[in-house]
Each structure stands twice: as structure tokens, then as C-alpha cells.
């Protein structure tokens, strides 16, 4: 048993994730579990609120990409410790999201941040990785039946692949079964609409908001 009051553990966990302190965040999760805190209490009363505040500070211009990245890493490290202690009945998923960087593109930092933010918000993530061909997206949709698919592109030369991938999903007869959001440096809302996506997220914080809005 940790001997610390639950409120103190939650406050510490919130603060460590907000500041991007990975090792102290992990220590706080372990202290909470050792002290008898429910995993869902740690997640919903400290970890998710901290990540929400990170996103809010980013949108207000108080946090920038480096701060957001280290907070996301602290969240990921904490989730790795917490996840084995959570059962399906403890934290029902808000839905499955398939994520991937489109074919020809190997950038993954932005995608990984979106993964962390969405998982922290309560979604189940299926990450296809980078350089994902259209056929792999189609197979993943058929296999996992996600509520949402996220596609990222970080190069102007690979951005057109977004539209081709969405068209492949449509040709497979799966387009009406899933919502598609897109993002990445060369993409904007107009590009997303022209490519046939349902939503556009310029950053990891907005990806959570857009995903929830599409499923509302």
C-alpha cells in the first residue's frame, strides 16, 4: 500500500502528465494501484483531465508542439502500466478507431500523438503504422469494424493518396460503414472535403473533438 491519500495521488498524477514528467507519472499510477485506487478513477479523474488541459493550452497558444509531445509521452507511459489492470467492464470503449499514415509516407509523430489522445479519451486504437497501402486500410475496416478511420499525410507528394485511399474504401463497399478523418501538414479542411473525408483535424487535440463530434 502506498499510504498516500487518493486525492493526493490523483493531484500528483494530473500534474505530472500536464508537465510531461513520464517517470513520476508512472510512479503515481503505481502508487494509486498499490493504494487501492480503481484504474478508472486514475484514468478519468486525473489522466484524461490532464490531457484535456494539455489540448486546451495548445489551442490557446500556451503550449506548443514540444510540450504537447512530452505530455503525450507521459500519458503513453502511464497507460502502459494502467492498461493491464483495466477490464472491459471497468472502462467501456467509446468505439474503435483505425489509424495509419498513408502509402508513401513514413512520418508517425503526429499520428502517434493522435493515438495517445484518442486512447486517453476512451477509444480503442488499431494503429496500422506508416506507409499503409489503401488495401490495408480496406482490410482493417472489414476486420475491425471501426467507428472512425484516421488517415495522416505529412508530405505534399503523398497527400493525393488520401483521396485514393478513401476511394478504395468506397469501391470495397465499406464507405457508408465508417467515418473518416484526415490530417497532416499539407492537408486543410478544403483538401479533406475534396478528398471525400468526413472531418479534418489540424492537430492531436482537435482530433479528439472532431472524432467525438462525428459520433455524436
Image (tube, rainbow, N blue to C red):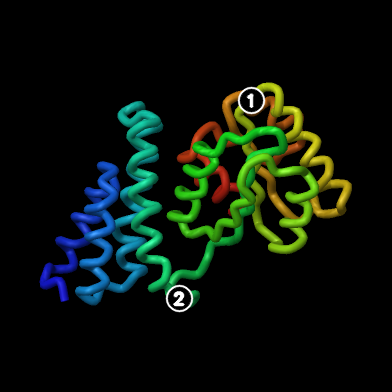
Identify which residue, 156 or 105, lies in the foreground.
Answer: 105
| Residue 12 visible at all | yes
Q: Position of residue 120 (x, y in %)?
A: 43, 55
**Circle 1 SS class:** loop
Give the CA distance from mark 2 to mark 1.
39 Å
Residue visible at 70% across and 28% down?
159
The residue carrying mark 2 is 87
**Which quadrant is home to the C terminus?**
bottom right
- Residue 98 % position (x, y): 64, 53
Q: Which label number is shown at residue 188?
A: none
Quarter holding residue 47:
bottom left
Q: Is residue 1 above or below residue 182?
A: below
Residue 70: name its quadrant.
top left
Q: Quadrant of the N terminus?
A: bottom left
Question: x, y (%) of residue 200?
Answer: 61, 35
Q: Residue furthest left?
A: 3
Classify 148 as above or below 165.
below
Q: Which residue is mark 1?
A: 155
Q: Secondary structure at mark 2?
A: loop
* Crowd around label 1: few <14 · some 14–19 · many ≥20 (10 Å): some
User: As drawn, is 15 to the left or to the right of 189?
Assistant: left
Amino acid at each position: 500500500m502506498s499510504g498516500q491519500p487518493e486525492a493526493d495521488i490523483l493531484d500528483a498524477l494530473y500534474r505530472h502528465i500536464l508537465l510531461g514528467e513520464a517517470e513520476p507519472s508512472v510512479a503515481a499510477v503505481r502508487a494509486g494501484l498499490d493504494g487501492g485506487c480503481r484504474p478508472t478513477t486514475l484514468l478519468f479523474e486525473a489522466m484524461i483531465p490532464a490531457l484535456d488541459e494539455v489540448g486546451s493550452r495548445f489551442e490557446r497558444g500556451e503550449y506548443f508542439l514540444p510540450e504537447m509531445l512530452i505530455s503525450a509521452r507521459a500519458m503513453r507511459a502511464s497507460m502502459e502500466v494502467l492498461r493491464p489492470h483495466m477490464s472491459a467492464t471497468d472502462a467501456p470503449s467509446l468505439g474503435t478507431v483505425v489509424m495509419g499514415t498513408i502509402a508513401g509516407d513514413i512520418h508517425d509523430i503526429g499520428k502517434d500523438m493522435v493515438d495517445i489522445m484518442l486512447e486517453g479519451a476512451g477509444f480503442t486504437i488499431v494503429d496500422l503504422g506508416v506507409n499503409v497501402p489503401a488495401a490495408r486500410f480496406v482490410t482493417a475496416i472489414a476486420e475491425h469494424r471501426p467507428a472512425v478511420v484516421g488517415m495522416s499525410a505529412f508530405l505534399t507528394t503523398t497527400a493525393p493518396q488520401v483521396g485514393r485511399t478513401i476511394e478504395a474504401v468506397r469501391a470495397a463497399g465499406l464507405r457508408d460503414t465508417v467515418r473518416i478523418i484526415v490530417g497532416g501538414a499539407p492537408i486543410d479542411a478544403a483538401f479533406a472535403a475534396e478528398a471525400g473525408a468526413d472531418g479534418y483535424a489540424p492537430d492531436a487535440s482537435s482530433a479528439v473533438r472532431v472524432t467525438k463530434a462525428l459520433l455524436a
